[in-house]
Amino acid sequence: DSPELRTKMKILHAVDKSLDHITISEICENAGISRQTFYRHFESKYDIPWWHAIFCRQFYLNEIGRTVDWKTGYYHHLRLISQERDFYCKSIQYSINTPFGQTVMPENRKTVLLETLETYRHIPIDHNMLFMVEVFSKLECEVLNDWFRSSEPTNLVQWTDDLLSIVPDRLYRALKVEEPAMEGR
């Protein structure tokens, strides 16, 4: 609830149409801020969805394999992102992953997965694991982007199950977080 976060969210909520069709001046007017304030927080209007998605990842998605299991991480990440689904539907009328997977989103995800494997799980990264993480990062990001740009109703349980089904088995097992043993069993 910092002032910086409040300003960024105010900017996000000021986007009322496609980023391709709204100007920074319109965003600033809608948010009640100056252009200087906008540029203090974002380099471009196209940075807004990237910032929000990466900001939200830190709470659950990036914690998969560290402190939460796959299902919990996916479900709560989707829940958090879906709170701003209206923004994604209105603002992103283009593919932020064109060409497939060539933006900051999958690169950020790949970096986090590799860090989790190496630093938190102490799993060496061989060629196959690196390939798997690179391809999976692109696929996961593309699927999430498609869902949040679509007009399909949000179905957190179904989306969580669908995401779980695309995780490669070796990666899933490498980042599996065991549930704590219950006393009295």
Image (cartoon, rainbow, N blue to C red):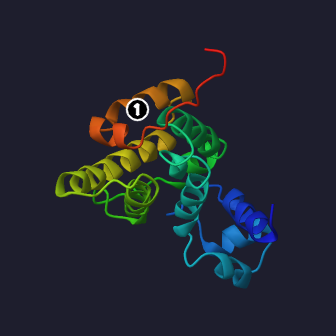
Does residue 71 appear to the left or right of 139 in the view shown? right
Using the image as rendered, state which of residue 175 and residue 105 is in the foreground.
175
Furthest-left residue in view? 127
Furthest-front residue in view? 184
Residue 154 coordinates in the image, percent (x, y): 56, 30
Q: Residue at x 55, y 30 (%)?
A: 179
State the quadrant of the C terminus: top right
Residue 139 coordinates in the image, percent (x, y): 32, 46
Does residue 78 appear to the left or right of 133 in the view shown? right
Count of marks, rendered view: 1
Residue 30 visible in the picture = no
Q: Residue at x 73, y 80 (%)?
A: 37
Residue 122 coordinates in the image, percent (x, y): 38, 55
Q: Residue at x 35, y 29 (%)?
A: 165
Residue 53 visible in the picture = yes
Q: Residue at x 55, y 41 (%)?
A: 68
State the quadrant of the N terminus: bottom right
Quadrant of residue 43 in the image?
bottom right
Using the image as rendered, state which of residue 163 and residue 63 is in the foreground.
63
Quadrant of residue 168 in the image?
top left
Q: Amino acid at mark 1?
A: Leu
Please name the residue that numbered disc 1 is placed on.
164
Residue 77 coordinates in the image, percent (x, y): 57, 43
Using the image as rendered, state which of residue 26 and residue 76 is in the foreground.
76
